[in-house]
Structure formats: C-alpha cells, structure tokens
Image (cartoon, grey):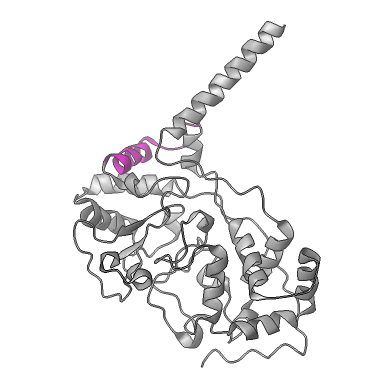
Amino acid sequence: MQLLNATATLGLGLALCSSTMAFAAEPITPIEAPTDVDAAKAEIGKQLFFDPRLSKSGFLSCNSCHNLSMGGADNLPSSVGHAWHQGPINSPTVLNSAYNLAQFWDGRAADLQEQAAGPIANPGEMAQPHNVALEVIASIPGYVESFSNSYGDDRIDLERVTEVIAEFERTLVTPNSRFDQWLTGNKQAITEEELEGYQLFKGNGCAGCHNGPAVGATLYQKMGLVKAYETDNPALGRYAVTGRDSDRMVFKVPTLRNIELTYPYFHDGKVSTLEEAVQIMGEIQLGRRFSESDTAKIVAFLKTLTGEQPDFALPQLPPSTPATPHPQPFGP
C-alpha cells in the first residue's frame, strides 16, 4: 500500500511538473489574481473608483475613463475630461495594471497608488484640487466610518485615499483566458488557427516585448523601432519624464490582455482595428509585412487573451450630507 501511494504521489508530481514546465517554456505565462488583498480597503477603493464626487464637476469618476464594462478603458481615441477637455493620449486599460512596471504611457508614476492621485487634480481630467477632494470625502459619514474601521482612526488624507483605490485596482485581474487554459494543459482550449497565430506571434519576434503574465507592460520600447511611426499626437513618451533625446517616442509596452476590448489602439488611439494594429506593428517594429492570412491568425490568437472580467456589484456610494459642496456644472 505504501508503495502504491508513493507511486501515485510520484505520478501526480511528475504530471504537475510536466504541466508547469510546459508553460514555463513559453514566453507568456498564466495570469493570476492576487491572494493578499485587504478586502476592507479594496471595498473603500471600489466606492471611490466609482464616486464622481472626487471630481470638480461631480460627473466624472475613475470609471469614466477606465470603464470596467469596456475592458477597463473607454474606447475613445482620448478621454473627455473636465470642461469637455480632450486629453492628448489614449486611456490605457486599468485591468491587470498591477502588473505594469510603472503607470501611464510614459511611466511617470511608479505604481498604482502614485497614479491614483494624478487624475483627481489634473485640470484636464477630474480637475479637483486634492485638498477639496479630501474635504468632500471627509464630510461623508459613510467614508469616515469605513476609513476608521479599516485604519483604526478617522484620518482621511491623500495617502490613504490613493492606497485604497490602488488596493481595489489590484483586484482587477482577468485570469482564465482560453490561452491560459491552453498554457495549463487544456490543448482543446484554442483552435488550430489560433495556435498558428501564436506560433507566428512568437516566430516573428512579437513576444520579445509582449511576454510574461500581462503579455507586455514590463519594459519601455521605442514606437517606430525600425520605421518611424507617423502621428500628429504631441505625446513624446519617456522624453517628457527624463528629458533625454533617446527617450523620444519611447513608451511603456502595453499589455495585450483583453486587447480585443480596448480599441482604439496605440498611445494616440489612431487605429481602430486589431488587424491594422498588427500590420502596423509588424512594419514599424519588426520590419515585416504580414499577409492577410497571417494577420488574421495573429488576431485570432490575440482574442484568446481575453480573460474573465471583474465580477462584482456596483457599490452603494455613501450618501452626501449638507456639508458636502454641491457639484459644479460640467464646465470651468
């Protein structure tokens, strides 16, 4: 009996090892949701993510530009902010953003917490000075109670507000895509065409930048590595952060997770279809011209990267009190 148990254990161990080695050899690895989330803080962050009272107009929330029903983006070339201001750059998805090496296209924010502070006070986005946003939150008894329960006191400051928003955003992971299922052993999870697309994706060098659990998001790369990318968008990428000429048009490589949902594409939102995006990237980054057939196969593969979308009920926002400033019109 002991011998049989040992044999069974060894067989199971070899099977698990074989499965692990199978996807470990691939440039893309399965993505997994975090297991160390502070649920209480994440719940406050979820409420704030959807709360338009963080904005000057009282109409805009984080979800306005990072809509969780639309792949964590807004499907616009560039987002519309306060006073109908249209920003200079495409809104990246918030889904799986915890895997980014830094936040924003130019990487100017080190992490999710630092990023969360930016749009609130940005005059072209939510346009609410931080001190005013904090006064609004502190005037709402429901938030005061939640922060007190989570932190042990009722202090509400920018560090705590951005921390809870970041904690919620850490939960926005999209596991169990069909491609993840294929990686972990279910060889029926993708079609022959999709598998051929993956082989083309690897064989042509796409995986050199788009790899790991997020299929990207872990390095910066020049947009137009082989051939200049033509755009009238004013964004200059990392140059705006570093001031180095070598960083002109260098952007954070985006995640390809859920890419079929997050059109239009590129930092300027110039391209509306995955087919065109694949062909342009092949030409300007790899010096290759993909045929229509190869393009269709690569696009088919990319669609297998759509995972399970965040599943939660919209939060019940704490009601305002008379002390809360009345929202200003959606204007200056």
Q: Nearer the viewer, residue 119 or 274?
A: 119
Looking at the picture, does residue 272 appear above or below residue 295? below
Looking at the picture, does residue 3 appear above or below residue 141? above
Range of residues picked out in magenta: 186-203
Percent across and percent down for residue 192 are: 36, 35
Looking at the picture, does residue 262 appear above or below residue 89? above
Indicate the quadrant containing the N terminus: top left, top right, bottom left or bottom right: top right
In the displayed structure image, the side of residue 182 where residue 291 appears, left or right: left
Percent across and percent down for residue 232 are: 26, 75
Quarter of the image for residue 92 reads bottom left
Percent across and percent down for residue 285 are: 24, 54
In the displayed structure image, the side of residue 77 where residue 69 appears, left or right: right
Does residue 68 appear in the picture of this structure? Answer: no
Does residue 203 appear in the picture of this structure? Answer: yes
Residue occupying image coordinates x 41% and y 51%: 216
Q: Main secondary structure of the magenta part?
A: helix
Looking at the picture, does residue 172 appear above or below residue 158? above
In the displayed structure image, the side of residue 164 where residue 331 appears, left or right: left
Residue occupying image coordinates x 58% and y 16%: 11
Percent across and percent down for residue 123 are: 49, 85
Total of numbered circles in the picture? 0
Residue occupying image coordinates x 44% and y 66%: 104
Is 193 in the magenta?
yes
In the displayed structure image, the side of residue 129 where residue 230 appears, left or right: left
Is 136 in the magenta?
no
